[in-house]
Amino acid sequence: METRIDLAIRCGEEKLCGSIYKALVPEINSLPERCRGKISGGGSVVNISIECRRPNHLRAVVNSLLPIIASMLESI
């Protein structure tokens, strides 16, 4: 069974969203083998979708991404 999460990061500014998108692409592209993800950006929103085979794998990925996202948003 796959578990999934969809995140929408509302940045406000297109330039800021572009920076966040560029910073997260390597993270999404290097997810563990048991997970897969997609990232898209446009305008003032960055969308991330992550699927993993098991809930604990998804939790680990989310727990590693959220501090990165939070620190980017706080540094503004």
Image (cartoon, rainbow, N blue to C red):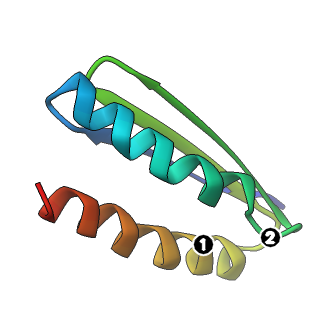
Q: List the residue tagged with mark 1.
A: 61
Q: Around disc 1, counting alpha carbons within 10 Å, would you say few (fewer than 14), some (14 to 19), or many (20 or more)? A: some
- Dot 1 or dot 2: first in sequence order is 2
Q: Which residue type does callout 1 highlight?
A: Val
Label 1 and label 2: CA atoms lie apart by: 8 Å
In the foreground, 15 or 52: 15
Q: List the residue tagged with mark 2.
A: 32
Residue 35 percent across, percent down from the top left: 79, 62
Secondary structure at badge 1 equals helix
Q: Which residue type does callout 2 highlight?
A: Pro
Residue 25 percent across, percent down from the top left: 59, 47
**In the visual, does 50 lie left or right of 66?**
right
Quick check: marks 1 and 2 in contact, CB under 8 Å? yes
Residue at the farthest top position:
43
Q: Quadrant of the C terminus?
A: bottom left
Q: Residue at x 34, y 61 (%)?
A: 69
Residue 73 percent across, percent down from the top left: 20, 57
